[in-house]
Image (spheres, rainbow, N blue to C red):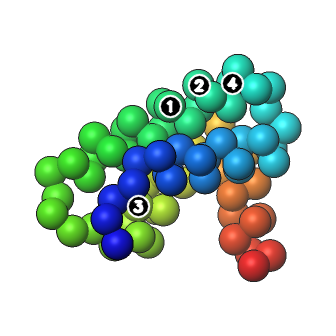
Amino acid sequence: QPFDAEKIKRAIEGAAREAGLPEDRVSQVATEVSGVVVGQTSTQEEIATSEIKSMILSELDKTEPNVSSAWRAYEASK
């Protein structure tokens, strides 16, 4: 399916809220991380969803580890 930067941002925001971040930090983290991921993928014609998820988690591990933990916990509970 087509790449959707807003979908990535919404997913990050959900994980950030689940991790208990204040709303201003939720927005900041989502913007920063989605920007990095979009920048890394913009030159690629096709990219696997799993690769995008890996990039997101890698960035979250660096910026807000508790958000990446919340993301992983959500994935594990599915």
Going by the image, does 31 lie left or right of 17?
A: left
Q: Which mark is residue 25?
A: 4
Q: Amino acid at mark 1?
A: Thr
Q: Disc 4 residue type? A: Arg
**Numbered mark located on residue 23 in the image:** none
Regarding residue 59, the answer to whether it shows in the image is no
State yes or no: discs 2 and 4 in contact (Cβ < 8 Å): yes
User: Can you name the residue that lies furthest to the right here?
Assistant: 20
Q: Residue at x 56, y 36 (%)?
A: 30
| Mark 4 or mark 1, earlier in chain | 4
* Residue 57: image location, x then y, percent: 54, 54
Which residue was labeled with disc 2?
28
Q: CA distance from mark 1 to mark 3?
A: 15 Å
Can you name the residue that lies furthest to the top here?
24
Name the residue that disc number 1 marks: 31
In the image, what residue type sits under mark 2? Gln
Circle on res. 52: 3
Marks 2/4: CA distance?
5 Å
Q: Quadrant of residue 22?
A: top right
For mark 2, give the secondary structure: helix
In which quadrant is the N terminus drawn?
bottom left
